[in-house]
Image: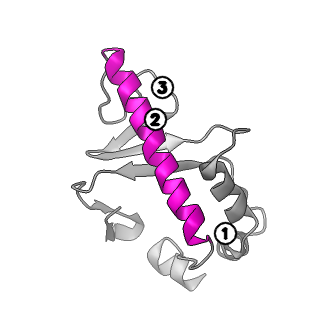
Amino acid sequence: VDAFERDGFVVVRDVVPAELLAASRAAALELFATYTRTIRARGLALGLGQRGGFREIVQRHAGRFELRLAEGESGPLHELRAHVLRSRAVEVARNALGDETRLVSSSCVVARVDCEARPARRGRAHRL
């Protein structure tokens, strides 16, 4: 709770096995490539805050994109979500935010290596 109050976020280490993280990363990059190819094929482009005709992807900052995960699908990203929900991370979140804490949606962020650092909550910079 102290770390959340001080930093605006909490890191819970070793919640997800490395193999699941690797599979989730590969799935996110594949999904991102599919969305961006389709957007280009339609003659559209993404810009800050624009969805390019998709509800599943939005550009949040230069070089940084958010991919929303659809409910009821399967694959590594959904396995990751399910694993986190069964983990001690939920207990940590409830301790920091209260017993009524619920996960209402899921998304992942894909960022290019050259993406500039963005300020996190409470003014701290981070790199994705």
> In the drawing, what numbered circle is on residue 54?
3
- In space, the residues marked 2 and 1 are separated at their CA atoms by 28 Å
Q: Amino acid at mark 3?
A: Phe
Residue picked out by circle 1: 97
Camera-side residue: 38 or 101? 38
Relative image position of residue 69 (x, y in whole percent): 59, 41
Q: Give the mark nearest the N terminus, 3 or 1.
A: 3
Q: Secondary structure at mark 1?
A: helix
Magenta-tinted stretch:
16-43
Residue at 66% across / 69% down in the picture?
Answer: 97
Relative image position of residue 75 (x, y in whole percent): 64, 46
Q: Is residue 26 above or below residue 121?
A: above
Q: Secondary structure at mark 2?
A: strand
Q: Is residue 16 rendered to the left or right of residue 57?
A: right
Q: Amino acid at mark 1?
A: Leu
Quarter of the image that includes the N terminus: bottom right
Q: Residue 60: which quarter of the image?
A: top left
